[in-house]
Amino acid sequence: MTAYYRFRSLLKWIFRRDDVEQALADDLEDYIERSAAEKMRQGLSREEAIRAARIELGGVERTKEEVRATLAFAPLDALLRDVRYAFRSFRAQKTFTAVIVLCLALGIGANATVFSFLDSILLRSLPVRNPDSVVRMLWTIQQPGPDVPFPSLQTNFLFNEGNGRVRGNAWSYPAFELFAEETDVLADIFGRLAVDQITVDDGEGPLASGTFVTGSYFAGLGVRPVAGRLLGDDDDRFDAPPAIVLDEEFSEARYGSAGAALGETIRLNGVAFTVVGVTPGEFFGLDPARSPDFYIPMRSGPLFQTTDVPPGQVAIGTTQEMFQRTDFYWMVVVARLRPGVSIEQANTVLGTKFDGYYAANAQGENALRNPPVLNLSSGRTGFDSLRFEYSDPLAVLFSMVLLILAVTCAGIAVVTGVLFGLAPALHATRVSVFPALKGSRSIESDPHIPGRLRVGFGQLLVVSQIALSLVLLIGASLFGATLSNLRTTELGYNTEGLLFATVNAGRAGYAKEELVTFYQRLRMRLIEETDVEAVSYSWSPLAGGGAFGGNVSVPGTTEEPEPINIQIVGEQFFETLGIPILHGRAISEGDINDARAVAVIDQTFAETYFPGIDATGRTIEVPNEGELTIIGVAADARQDLIRDDVLPVVYYTYTFDPHPLQLTFYELRTRIDPLAFRDRFRSIVRDLDPAVIVTATATHRDQIDSSISMEIMFARLSEAFAGLALLIACVALYGTVSYAMARRTPEIGIRIALGASRGRVLKHAFRQILWLGVAGLVLGVPAAIVAARFVESFLWGVAPYEPGILFGAAVAVLAAVAVAGFVPARRASLIDPMVALRSE
Amino acid sequence: MVRSPKGASSGKLTVPQGTLDLLILTILRREPLHGYGISQRLKSLTEGAFQVNPGSLFPALYALERDGKLRCEERLSENNRKARYYALTARGRKQLESEEQRWERVTAAISSVLEGA
């Protein structure tokens, strides 16, 4: 407190010096006046009296100088002394200092990381011209359910709004063109489609991600190139020479500078593009969560399609057909409002137009029961998919950071309190000039050190730290349990020794039957390897990659087609993955060679469509492909992102439907560590045909992890935070106990001298420590239960109030508290009574 | 309290180190006073035994004000001159109480030593 007043006074002295000088002059003037008046009453003349008064004052200037020194130098000196003292204490207490620095570093680091994350995702404005007039075009529908049909459109991009509605951010190209006509309200409109995992040139380097953009994209956003030019309408034609714009960072990494890239040829998935320009590094497109490496024209998509692509399926990029279809919603659309047009006005104009468009193109009797409704939204801070998905997770992260910050602050308060409280207290007793005067030596009686108060406050801080640590530890346990549940979830197949590899022969020029032959040859070649136990391949990757959805209908039932997962498989798929066939038989090589119209369904499918009856021999109908006869029922195996609910699955052969085959996922069961086989796999493919690209290889674990990155991040961060919090709490407790024990050294000495056993002293001290721990738990458990409710939606396979986790975390915290308190308590109990008494 | 016979040539005592603050605070407990008033009150209370040099008084006053134990009010004196009156703050009051206690202990201890000797 005194330091505060001194500092304030110093500031006053520095910044309002005239006032201070005036006051001082007034004071001395007044003194002389009064003193002289008194002396005149005693008979002196006025002059004599004033002279005498000045002499009495001892010189006006000298007195002023003394006061100035008091105001200016004493506080400075005291500050310097404090700082010097602090450094001396730090030197003397190296461990404490190290821990404080560590706590601060970790606390600040955690905050900086999460804040920069928050900043880039939630707070940063779009790096474009006049971001306030940019709007994103969204639509919402009612959450589809048993009574609410899905609208008559296809889309891959849906986000839950949480109020019973679902939001889509993708549009059909004809709808985009329709909006583009509304030049009264829109100054510009442009679209994009993000693509990931693009092979660059030879495919040896890292995969790149990019964005397909419409011709008006850069002009509409008002982005200026750092080199060359950006894409325009002339580039966005089917017959235009393939042009590409690179991100500055990507360009520098690849060509050394932005300018050096111009005119270079770059091959993406085998298609050659010429670099025409470079975007500035701070431009990240429209989604702060992803920074594309390159931008290519929307209409360059068909260059990537070397074979016919079945309706509704996108291998990469766009197809000619996608520009025509009215019911396929795939392009993210952004617009710039005309000056003076409000979002609401634009929404009304465009919404009416879109309602008409949807009604005119919708098909089926249910199509109009849940129509998409246009909903413009400000694009000021970007358009990220991540923000849709991550704003809740970010809130959780932020809360964790706030907790850790609270723990850090409390920890530092306690530790510094001990440093600056304990040391002077001991110091003061040692150098006391009047030892005899101290009838009862105690720190409390020294007015400068409110000992009892400080310990009380310190204990409060320690208790709250323990409570917060418990909250974080329970959070960490919940997230950790979620992660391990996700990783060990029953997938329905054997994950041991599995290697997944993505092979794209379509890009090398193979088509239809050639593709079939190539993939079969590759499989036969792989089987010859002694390290390989079994090989198969399929249309989509298992767990983690996301399966392709579709519809089937069951002839003889009146039910509407339900969404299912379709898996198109090669030879020995079930055998390779170890998916048991419960009934009937698996798809045989004969089925494949003869392209038989047969299917294996999974148990969920059988229970949904054929409850209580034998499904084998029955038929199902796949739209556009025809009827399939069911030959077997397989056990459930998860095809989709592992957190999703299990959808029914239909398996059939790729010879029955070879369309999707240009990109195929191989599943290998290896006899060795699957990672050790990766390079061999690549070289085998290269030997067969150097033009065929292996775009990705992953172990089962990688495959899973890539789909649960958020859960992994939560678990890792919360574990780190909980550990940190517990560490800080323990250090603080250690400090508090040391302090309390040091204060009680004489008392302990007397107790021991009077015959108390050391064990008894230790027990006494220990009881107090445990009491602090228990108080922390009493506060922490309810807080954790409240906090757990907020993260419930991020948990999987674990209840927020899992007693085992609550108990385990409580025990862990108590144990840590016990250890942190035991060390100083034990040290105190071992004190030599003579030494202790002499400290009196 | 140590007293000395009134009028003795050795009667003028300098204020013991560290007790000037205590004396100032005690005097201001009753009412706010200006600098001259404080020095006069000090003289009269100790019957002239303690004399405080204004060259020590003012630095002490400003130090107490600096540390938030005194505050200053400006008033007009009888002859229309600006006069600064010093008053106790809550902090000053607290300081006074603890200083008093300390002083009592010190004097009690010294007395007992002197009596025992």
Image (spheres, rainbow, N blue to C red):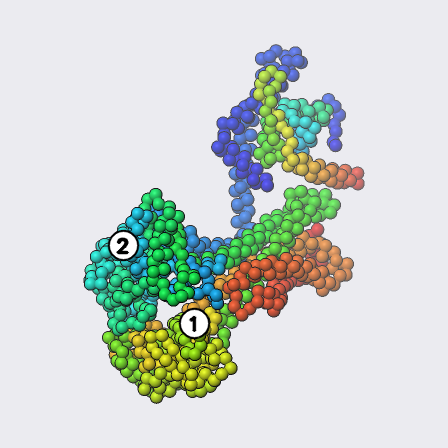
Residue bearing mark 1: A560
Crowding around mark 1 (Cα neighbors within 10 Å: few <14, some 14 to 19, many 20+) is few
Horizontal side of A824 relative to A690 (left or right) equals right
Q: Residue at x 76, y 40 (%)?
A: B113
Q: Secondary structure at mark 1?
A: loop
The disc labelled 1 sits on which kind of residue? Glu
Task: Work out whether mark 2 precedes mark 1 in sequence or the reverse, and give the earlier one.
Answer: 2
Percent of width and height locating residue A122: 43, 53
**Residue tagged 2:** A216
Query: Which image quadrant is residue B112 in?
Result: top right
Whole-percent x, y for residue A180 in the image: 29, 53
Element type at mark 2: loop
Q: CA distance from mark 2 to mark 1?
A: 41 Å
Amino acid at dot 2: Ser
At horizontal 22% and vertical 60% (from top left) the residue drawn is A237
Residue A102 vs residue A505: left or right?
right
Q: Is residue A426 above or below residue B12?
A: below
From the top left corner, tell me how far across and down residue A116 is, in percent: 43, 54
Question: Quadrant where the N terminus of chain A lies?
Answer: top right
B115 or B58, which lies in front? B58
Is residue A699 something one can see in this rendering? no
Residue A288 found in image quarter: bottom left
* Picture layout, residue A704 above or below residue A429: below
Inspect this view and state whether residue A198 appears.
yes
Q: Is residue A525 left or right of residue A780?
A: left
Q: Residue furthest bottom?
A: A590
